[in-house]
Amino acid sequence: MNIWLLLIPVISAFIGWFTNWVAIKMLFHPRQPKKILGITIQGIFPKRQIQFAQKLGKLVSEELLSFDEIANTISSPENLDKLRPMIESHVDHFLREKLSAEMPMISMFIGDKTITKLKTVFMEELTTLFPSLMKEYAGELKQQLDLEKIVTEKVAGFSSDKLESILMQIMAKEFRFVEILGGVLGFLIGLLQVAITVFTA
């Protein structure tokens, strides 16, 4: 068998690996548009960074972090129950300590029973007020914080180096797998070429 035939799978494997390696590099490079043989070439992510930032901002604001969900969560009875001991403690401290210090005459007429009743009234009112108060606060927060705009501006403002670093940290194994897969497929195609050459000779 011709020795050069044996090199075909190796060469094909190298070509398969190299083309995939170049394709991955071209996701990020060149950073700036460059003309090569009259064709403008730029890395996919640098070229599409603004669109990527806009899509990500929309996804975060609509799907990942909804102010409606936040409002429902913070205004739920379960969260109020978690806060209740702390609130009762503050109300008790206010009625027993601060009120006595600020208005000694009134505190003379307030005993334990009155304090207990006042705390009960305060907590019942808070139970009614808390959900609507939290939802209203979340609504105002939504107007003040435009999540889509914030995420879009942050991602669009990333340097190309930082964007590449982030994506490489997340997808390094996948990129390596693509490179190896290119080499393996290239090698198999090379073996196929050798087999066809041998059996048709």
Image (spheres, rainbow, N blue to C red):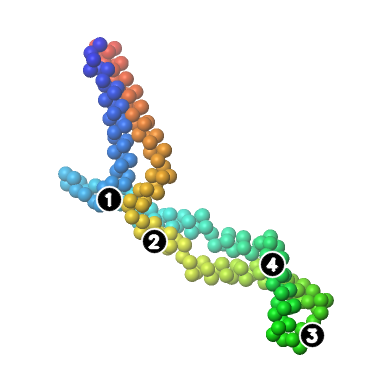
The residue indicated by pointer 4 is 86
Q: Is residue 180 visible?
A: yes
Q: Which residue is mark 2?
A: 153
Q: Is residue 77 visible?
A: no
Dot 3: element: loop
Earlier along the polypeptide chain: callout 3 or callout 1?
1
* Mark before the other along the chain sequence, 2 or 1: 1
Q: Position of residue 160 (x, y in %)?
A: 32, 52
Query: Looking at the picture, how far across and down is residue 144, in whole percent?
Result: 49, 69
User: Badge 1 is on which residue?
Assistant: 31
Determine crowd level at label 2: few under 14, some 14-19, many 20+ residues with C-alpha closer than 10 A.
some
Q: Is residue 172 above or below residue 186?
A: below
Counting every numbered tag in the picture gives 4
Q: Residue at 59%, 70% (x, y): give it.
A: 136
Q: Which residue is mark 3?
A: 108
User: For the residue marked with disc 3, what is the amino acid?
Assistant: Met
Q: Nearer the viewer, mark 3 or mark 2?
A: 3
- Judged left or right of residue 57, residue 100 is right
On screen, 28 above or below 83?
Answer: above
